[in-house]
Image (cartoon, grey):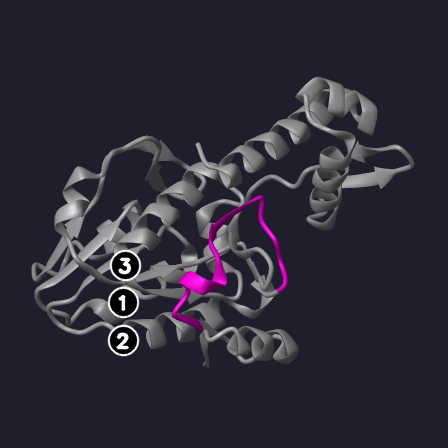
Amino acid sequence: MGKEHRLAQRRQAILTAFDGAGQLSVAELSSHFGVSEVTIRTDLRALSRQGLLVRTRGGATAVMAQPELSFDIRQQQQAEQKTRIGRAAAALVQDGDAIALDASTTAIAMIPYLENRRDLTVVTNSLKAAMGLLRNRHVNVIMPGGRLRRDSISLVGPNEHKELAQIHLLMGFFGARGVTLEQGLTDVNLEEAEWKRRMVASCRSVITLLDATKWGQVGVITFAPLQQVSQIITDRDAPAELVDAVRRQGVEVTIV
């Protein structure tokens, strides 16, 4: 298990501890998790920046957690921007390509614009993507197995993906909960992030699809640092200063 994964697991466990206790001190958390108080303070700062905890003198308190919105509700948010982003992303895909699509609502916005592609191979964990491509007999859809995650209508969980070793993926299209210079592309669910990380490693080009609300946001776990990202497609409300900073890192940013 990698360092990033252990970090995310501990931070999720910290949030769970607050659900039961409401308020905890740095000393209590340090003793419970067997890590230094410096490490706990770093965790609390990160969770506070995400709005998941409220820092107090010597500790933190829980906040009322907002439940994860259903896929259908999230699909309606920033709908016009996601449509433009999806259309621009689909224009990069040519007949005969092999691509990855994650289960984000922004990546799913590509589906209507892939209808005329021929000899296309799509690797996805999204049931929505698979159903959307069902009508096109010229698209080969590959879905590695797993457990149904209802919030994203996707398959997640342990899977060796042996069949993917035989496929050369030209591009992967990924949504994210947020993007920053320091944390790169982040998500809030460990299993979704792990699937994305495996797909990122299998793709020659990593293309991120983000509406403007995701810039400067940080999820619990990083699935790709900026060094692995080839291109970001976003809308014209994206913060110009952060867009310029990302471009200086060598990442192409397309605004639609």
The amino acid sitting under disc 1 is: Pro
Q: Locate residue 192 relative to residue 220 in the image: left or right.
A: left
The residue identified by callout 2 is: 92
Distance between mark 3 and mark 1 Cα atoms: 22 Å
Magenta-colored span = 216-232
**Position of 91 relative to 199 (above/below):** below
Distance between mark 3 and mark 2 Cα atoms: 14 Å
**Position of 2 relative to 79 (above/below):** above
Q: Quadrant of residue 134?
A: bottom left
In the rendered picture of this protein, how many numbered marks are placed on residues?
A: 3
Q: Which mark is residue 112?
A: 1
The amino acid sitting under disc 2 is: Leu
Q: Locate residue 182 relative to residue 172 in the image: left or right.
A: right
The percent position of residue 226, horizontal first and vertical second, equals 48, 63
Q: Residue 228 magenta-drawn?
A: yes
- The first of marks 1 and 2 along the sequence is 2
The residue identified by callout 3 is: 203
